[in-house]
C-alpha cells in the first residue's frame, strides 16, 4: 500500500450495505477503501424485498434502470388462521405513490448487487479489494488502521458492514442487546417451472398454523420462497437436505415442479448493537442488528443505516460541520438508527407473534380476536403504515406527525426553458430528488411562504413554474400534516416543519444551530 495515503472512509464488507455506503460516499467525492473476504457477489439470494425508501436511494445512485428487470411489485400477503380463514391482508397504498416508487417490491439480490458494484466501479475515488480478509482493526485520535491480508489501510473513519458475525464488532468488543426472538427456521428458494407456478397461490401467504407456521413469498419471475418453522427436536441440517426439503414442500410442490435454488436453516434472531459507534468506527447493516424476516425489512434496514451515516460523514469530512456539532452529528447516527431498529423490530415481532403461535387454543383465540377487531371483514393494511418514523436524533424540537417521517417525492413537470429541464427531448416529468438533488432542502408549499437560509440549503418552492407537481402528492402531504414548509435532510427524512409562514425562520435557525452553521 501507499504508506502516506489516508482514505476518508474504509468500509469492511461489500454486501448491499457496504455497496450503498461506497456508492454514496464515493459519489460525494470522498476517498473510500472497501475490503471484502469473498471474491464475487454472493450468488444466493438472502434478501428478497425492498421498499420505496430504498428505491429512492437507488435513484440517487443512478442504478434504477440497471436493476429494473430484477424488481417486481410485492403481491399482497394474506394471513390464514387455524381453519384456513383469512385473518389479515397486507398490501400497499394505491398510486400516486408517496415516494415516487412502488412502495413494496420483491427483487433478485445477486444482479441488484452487481448493478450497485458496477456503479461503484465508475467512481475512481473508491478502491475495492475483493478476496481480502480484515485481520485486525485499531484506532487512535486521528484515524483507523485496518490490517488486511493484502496490507495495511489507514482511514479517517471506518464502517463495519461485515455482517451478523462482524469481526469488527467482535474485535472492538461491541456487545449486542437481545431483543428476545430466537427460533429455528428453514428458508427454501425454488425456481418453479410452469407446472409448479400453476399449483401455487397468486399472493404471498402467511400460514398461521400452530402445527407448523410458515410463509410463502411470491418472488420475482419464477422465484418462490418458503420459510418453514422447525419443530422441537428437528435437526436443522437434516431438514436442509434435498430429500427432507422436498418432503416439507410436498403440500405445494413435487420435485417435477421446479428446482431447489437453495435451502438453509437459520435461527431467526432479534438483536441490536448496544452502541453503534466506537470512536471513529461505526457499525451498519447486519453487523448492527438482526431482525426476523416477517416484514422483509432486513436489507432495507442496512441501506437505511448507511444512507443515514453517509451524509453525516460527508458533512464532517468536507468540513461543512465542525467541532462539537460534528461530534453530535456523528453521534446522532446511532441514536436515530438504534431507536428506529428497536421500534421496527418490536413491530416485526408483533407480526411474528401472529404467525408463530403454536398453541392451538391460543391460535384460535387469535383468529377470533382478529376477526372481531375488523368486524369479520378483513381490511387491507398497507405495509408502509407499519414502519416507524425517526423519533430521536437530529430533529426539530417539535411534536407533530411529520417530523422524522420520509418527505414525499412527487413527480414534477419538466420542460425546456426551465432551469433544470433535462437535455433529452420528450421528457415531460421528473421525480423531485432528480430535480433538486439530495442535500438539505427547504420545501415550501407555495410561493407565498417565505424562505430562510443556511449554507448549502436549497429552497424548493412547489407550484412554481420550475417545480409544479403533477399528482398533488406533496400538496396533500402539507395539508395532512397542517404545515406550509418542510425542512428535509439529505436522507429525505423531515427535520421539522413550519405550521405557518412565521415559523419558517425559527425552523431553519434551529437546524443551523444544531449543525453549527450560520443562519
Ligand atoms: O411484506 C410482506 O408482506 C412480507 C415480507 C416478507 C419478506 C420475506 C420474508 C417474509 O417472511 C416476509
Image: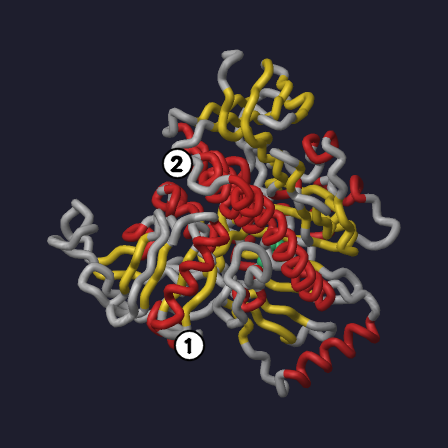
**Element type at marker 1?**
loop
The residue depicted at 70 percent of the width and 42 percent of the height is: 264
**Element type at marker 2?**
helix
Image side of residue 197 versus residue 133, left or right: left
Beta carbon of the mark 1 residue lies under 8 A of ligand 1: no
User: In which quadrant of the rendered view does residue 462 lie?
Assistant: bottom left
Residue 263 percent coordinates (x, y): 67, 42
Q: Which residue is mark 2?
A: 27
The residue depicted at 59 percent of the width and 16 percent of the height is: 152
In this view, the residue in front, 178 or 226, is 178
- Judged from this view, the residue extending furthest toward the left is 417
Instruction: Specify the quarter for ligand 1.
Output: bottom right
Residue 365, above or below 127: below
Residue 150 percent coordinates (x, y): 59, 14
Residue 511, above or below 114: below
Q: Which residue is mark 1?
A: 482
Image side of residue 410 versus residue 106, left or right: left
Amino acid at each position: 500500500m501507499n504508506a502516506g495515503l489516508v482514505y476518508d472512509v474504509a468500509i469492511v464488507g461489500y454486501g448491499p450495505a457496504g455497496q450503498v455506503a461506497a456508492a454514496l460516499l464515493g459519489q460525494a467525492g470522498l476517498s473510500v477503501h472497501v475490503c471484502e473476504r469473498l471474491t464475487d457477489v454472493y450468488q444466493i439470494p438472502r434478501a428478497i424485498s425492498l421498499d420505496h425508501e430504498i428505491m429512492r436511494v437507488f435513484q440517487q445512485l443512478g442504478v434504477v434502470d440497471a436493476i429494473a428487470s430484477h424488481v417486481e411489485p410485492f403481491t399482497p400477503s394474506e394471513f390464514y388462521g387455524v381453519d384456513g380463514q383469512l385473518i389479515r391482508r397486507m398490501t400497499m397504498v394505491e398510486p400516486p405513490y408517496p415516494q415516487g416508487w412502488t412502495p413494496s417490491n420483491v427483487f433478485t439480490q445477486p444482479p441488484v448487487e452487481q448493478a450497485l458494484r458496477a456503479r461503484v466501479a465508475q467512481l475512481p475515488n473508491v478502491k475495492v479489494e475483493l478476496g481480502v480478509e480484515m485481520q485486525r482493526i485499531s484506532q487512535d485520535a486521528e484515524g483507523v488502521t485496518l490490517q488486511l491480508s493484502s496490507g495495511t489501510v489507514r482511514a479517517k473513519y471506518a464502517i463495519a458492514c461485515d455482517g451478523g458475525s462482524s469481526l469488527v464488532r467482535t474485535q472492538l468488543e461491541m456487545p449486542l442487546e437481545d431483543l428476545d426472538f430466537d427460533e429455528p427456521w428453514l428458508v427454501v428458494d425454488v425456481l418453479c417451472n410452469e407446472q409448479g407456478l400453476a399449483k401455487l397461490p397468486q399472493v404471498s401467504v402467511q400460514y398461521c398454523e400452530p402445527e407448523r407456521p410458515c410463509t410463502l413469498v411470491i418472488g420475482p419471475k419464477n422465484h418462490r420462497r418458503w420459510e418453514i418453522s422447525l419443530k422441537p427436536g428437528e435437526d436443522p441440517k437434516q431438514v436442509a437436505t434435498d430429500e427432507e426439503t422436498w418432503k416439507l414442500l410436498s403440500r405445494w410442490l413435487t420435485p417435477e415442479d421446479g428446482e431447489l435454488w437453495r435451502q438453509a436453516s437459520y435461527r431467526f434472531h432479534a438483536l441490536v448493537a448496544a452502541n453503534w459507534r466506537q470512536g471513529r468506527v461505526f457499525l451498519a447493516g447486519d453487523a448492527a442488528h438482526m431482525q426476523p424476516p416477517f416484514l422483509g425489512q432486513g436489507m432495507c434496514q442496512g441501506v437505511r443505516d448507511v444512507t443515514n451515516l453517509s451524509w453525516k460523514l460527508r458533512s464532517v469530512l468536507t468540513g461543512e460541520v465542525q467541532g462539537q456539532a460534528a461530534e453530535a452529528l456523528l453521534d446522532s447516527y446511532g441514536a436515530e438508527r438504534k431507536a428506529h431498529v428497536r421500534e421496527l423490530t418490536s413491530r416485526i415481532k408483533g407480526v411474528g407473534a401472529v404467525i408463530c403461535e403454536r398453541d392451538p387454543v391460543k391460535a384460535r383465540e387469535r383468529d377470533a380476536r382478529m376477526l372481531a377487531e375488523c368486524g369479520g371483514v378483513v381490511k387491507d393494511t398497507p405495509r408502509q403504515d407499519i414502519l416507524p418514523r425517526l423519533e430521536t436524533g437530529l430533529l426539530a424540537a417539535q411534536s407533530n406527525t411529520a417530523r422524522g417521517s420520509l418527505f414525499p417525492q412527487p413527480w414534477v413537470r419538466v420542460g425546456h426553458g426551465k432551469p433544470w429541464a433535462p437535455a433529452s427531448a420528450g421528457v415531460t416529468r421528473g421525480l423531485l430528488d432528480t430535480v433538486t438533488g439530495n442535500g438539505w432542502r427547504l420545501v415550501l408549499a407555495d410561493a407565498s411562504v417565505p424562505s430562510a437560509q443556511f449554507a448549502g440549503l436549497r429552497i424548493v418552492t412547489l407550484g412554481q413554474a420550475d417545480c409544479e407537481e403533477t399528482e398533488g402528492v406533496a400538496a396533500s402531504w402539507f395539508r395532512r400534516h397542517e404545515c406550509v414548509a418542510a425542512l428535509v435532510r439529505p436522507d429525505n427524512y423531515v427535520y421539522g416543519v413550519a405550521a405557518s409562514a412565521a415559523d419558517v425562520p425559527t425552523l431553519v435557525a434551529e437546524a443551523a444551530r444544531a449543525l453549527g452553521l450560520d443562519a
